[in-house]
Amino acid sequence: MKTLAHNQSHTPSAAHTIAGTPAVLLHPLGWPLLLVLILSILAGALAYQSPPQGAVTVGWLGDQLFLNTSAGLGGEAVQQGAFYPDDLTPDSPTTRSRWTRQQATLVLPNLGSGSDLELTMLVQGWPADVLDPPARGVVEADDGTVQPVVVVQVDGQVLERFTPTSSWQTFSIPIPASARRNADLTLQLIVTATFEATERGPDPRPKGVRLAQINVTAPPGDPLTPQPPAWQAVGLLTVAVVLWYVLLIRVTASYPLSFLLTALAAGAAATGLALARIWMGATLQVIIGVLLVALVVAWSGPLLGFVRQLLHRYVHGHALTYALVGVAFAWLGTVVAQQVQRWRVQQPDFSIVHNLFPDSLLIGLLLVGLLALALVLGREGLPRIADGIVDFIGGPRSALLLLVVLGGLWLGYEIIVISALPYVGHADYADNAVVARNLAAGRGWVVDYVTQFYKIYPTTTRPQETWPLLQPVWIAPFIALFGPQAWAAKIPNIIFNALLLLLLYRIGARLWDRRVGLLAALLTLTNHLFFTLTIYTTSDLPFVVFSTAAIYFLYRYVTTAAADAEQRGKVPPLAYLAGSGVFTGLMMLQKPSGAMIALGMGIWLLISVFNWRALTAPEHRLSTTWHSLRRVVLLAGVWTAIALVVLSPYLARNVALFGKPVYSTESYDAWVLGYRGDSGEAWHDIYRVYTPELGGPGLPDRSWILRWGFDYTYAKFRTQVQALREYLVPAWSGLPAALAGEDGYLPLLSRNEEKNLLTPAGIWLAWIGMVAALRSRWRLLSLLLLAFAPYTVFLLTYWRTNEERYFLMVMPWLYLLAAWMIWAGYDRLSAIGQRRWSPLALILVGVVGTAIVQPSWGPIATKVQVEPQQWSPDVQAYRWIEENVPPATVIMTRNPWQLNWHTERPAVMIPNTADKGLLFGLARHYEAEYLVFETLQRIKGDGARTLAPLIGAADAQVGDVIDGFEVVYASPTPDNRVLIYRFPDSFVETAE
């Protein structure tokens, strides 16, 4: 669709406007731009004639423009003068503050250096209950507490010393102009001593003083005396104003209006420098970054048009063909050179020929036969063979035959693997199997264990309230047929694998050709992440199937709705819409987070179905627009209604049990996980006792962001962005430092190619496919981007992205794009020289396909060979419990889900608490009689420290008594031992 600016450039008035033409980039370099430059420089210089003033509230948003922060305890943070993360400080006048280390540095950029200043700081010293204060570097303060001395340096010169108190105080420090070295004011606080612990608890951070606010003012001076501007700030202001001017030219398409608005913006920016210099001087670079992004967005239409023109030239010209030939020869030359280098460096070892005999003889005969075949057939016969192979791969029947045979072999291998694995997985994986077993027994969606402490339940039996409800429905029939066996719970995985195989083949064959569908389907299923989904009872595999089908059916509806259904196919377009609605409902029922994908799909549907041409048509009528709008609302309403009908059982159950349509304890986990990092100890925060009934802090909600602080919140968000980048963005390493960072990676790209979901080769091909889709599959690309954008934002801001399975539903589409590029490359290479390059093209297809698949072999081998050994001690211990512990006995463990699946005994989570009495109280409430420490998912945090004597008894034997707990089971292995204790008979009295 052409832009409005493009249409304007073809009207008679285009000579007086500047939208959409290349002249836009040249014309402003004349008098208007010169006036803008002069105006910006004058405005910036005049702004510095006003005395500087402003305040920074430390611990609130934006203070990191002036200081560095770090939660680490290393010496590097001390040398940098970094502050600790911000704290909620109720007794502070600003309600937030930061602790310093032994030294702290603040920089007020672009403040100016021509006048005297008055610096005011709001500071609090050590609390009165400090434990073990240091003997040196401290004095007695006015309030009788032990305090350090704070030395204040400005631009490297010592200007003041003061002693804080345990309460908040304001300290004022005059800064003469003669002490300044440049326009930036650098403030250093050097504390003569630090402390760690108080009577309220341990804190390993060496802390200096608290800082809540700094304020800078200037005494009145001679208004006729000129002040030197901060020329760096003036330059930044000029750049920002010029960028603003260019942006306005693009948006308004009018030079006079752009110049007027630019003059107003320059005046506003100069006023900001005059009245709020601290903040304006620090945010100029941020403003420039925002304007650059806005310019890219504003010029996205012409930029995308330019990319499409390039793609058109590549497709219809010879440039891409020659480039592919060059890349192919470069690749072959690199491989040969590497092998020659290895042969020269390493001593040739021919013993492998002897060791592999007679296989080596057969391999040699095969290679000789292939060489003889190449010599006999020559340059005409080999291309015919290559083309015949490709025709067989893409044939109507042969492609389906290959899909069935190769896919069947892989599914058969997975069946063999899952039949030998005696476990179903951890946490939600095991929970799905447990709920399915209870469904098959007629008990409903209930579980017999307590995993968290957001509330206290009467018993261990409760409604399942954490994870989605549909996966157990798929498992329950097979458990009813074959019993509660691990392999029976995984049969739905094989079925959904087969469905995904057929679905991807259908999508690829319909949108491209059968070769693409076949290759994409096989690449997807052989990925190690999808293999992992198969050997565990997770909800993600059906979620991938439903989301892929929902998106495809919606795309098919929109692309066929404008044509006659009888001419386009046997399936009427409305059937596609209804099918998409059903699969969308199943997608949300499988995982409620799919509602974010549905939101993006709905937005795309509204945009795609609406008749935008009617708005710009010369005979535009309101009735036409109203008719189009009614049609859009009707179709979107039908699609939404179908999806909600499918989802309604889940909503009804939640309303009946929990009083709200959408409920999960993960709504509390979201405000806990990730805010203290991703360590195992931080993860165990969700197992703390939160219920106020037992003295907990209450249910976590979004207000907890203020408790964690802005630094920890930003750190969590940054971690999620980095994880997203590692999964979905290709890496480009080994570049010179001038082009890349110190680590050799290109900016904005992945820093770890091993984490790419599609492996390095696959993710690069997928991205190239996305670029190619701008020309020929732009509607599909827009649907995928809109569908997954709200979901990604949801994960970044609310939940988390740093787990690969949250993005598995994107992988089939990426594999389709990658397969499209692989076969497109084959077609272009084989077309050269009367198809004489077909053999090379086919070799490249095989090599690239292998490069995509091969990185999954190692993780799959680990799952098959190593992981069962890791599970073995736990499975043996569960077998002992099943044989020796009465059925109704409650067991306290770190893994209630899998313990209940393997033993059918009720269980309760070991709380993450340092209060031994609280731990015993919960055990007493739920009538726990045994305490289990498994080898997998070990207990960490305060709970581990509370039970350290029991956990650390590596040599304990059956019958030993430790802290009153009797050892009743110990794994018969030298390491990785599972220990099972019986609670002491008197543990109730002990707790009291």
Image (tube, rainbow, N blue to C red):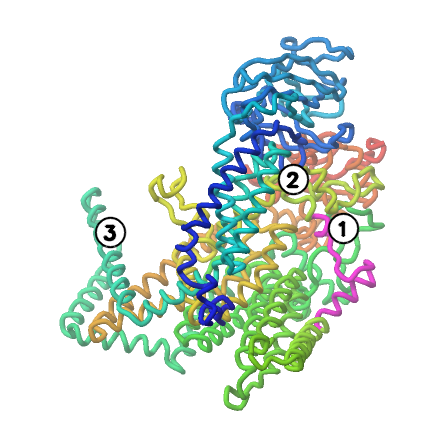
Q: 290 above or below 432?
A: above
Q: Which residues are magenta?
A: 646-669
- Please state which amino acid type lies under the numbered disc 1: Pro
Residue bearing the label numbered 2: 939
Residue bearing the label numbered 3: 352
Q: Residues within 10 Å of mark 1 (few under 14, many from 20)?
A: few
Q: Nearer the viewer, mark 1 or mark 2?
A: 2
**Horizontal side of residue 460 vs 631, given as left or right:** right
Residue 773 quadrant: bottom left
Q: 637 above or below 237?
A: below
State the residue in front, 560 or 403.
560
| Residue at the image position 60 percent from the left and 19 percent from the top | 116
Q: Whole-Å distance between the Cαs marked 3 and 2?
A: 48 Å
Q: Whole-Å distance between the Cαs marked 3 and 1?
A: 58 Å
Rendered location of residue 108, percent (x, y): 57, 28
Residue 356 quadrant: bottom left
| Residue at the image position 57 percent from the left and 64 percent from the top | 786
Residue 374 quadrant: bottom left
Quadrant housing the C terminus: top right
Q: Whole-Å distance between the Cαs marked 1 and 2?
A: 25 Å
Residue 615 magenta-highlighted: no
Q: Nearer the viewer, mark 3 or mark 2?
A: 2
Residue at the farthest front position: 224
Q: Is residue 495 visible?
A: no
- Please state which amino acid type lies under the numbered disc 2: Ile
**Horizontal side of residue 738 vs 561, given as left or right:** left
Residue bearing the label numbered 1: 886
**Horizontal side of residue 673 vs 990, given as left or right:** left
Q: Decide: marks 1, 2 in contact (CB < 8 A)?
A: no
Q: 721 above or below 90?
A: below
Residue 658 magenta-highlighted: yes
Q: Nearer the viewer, mark 3 or mark 1?
A: 3
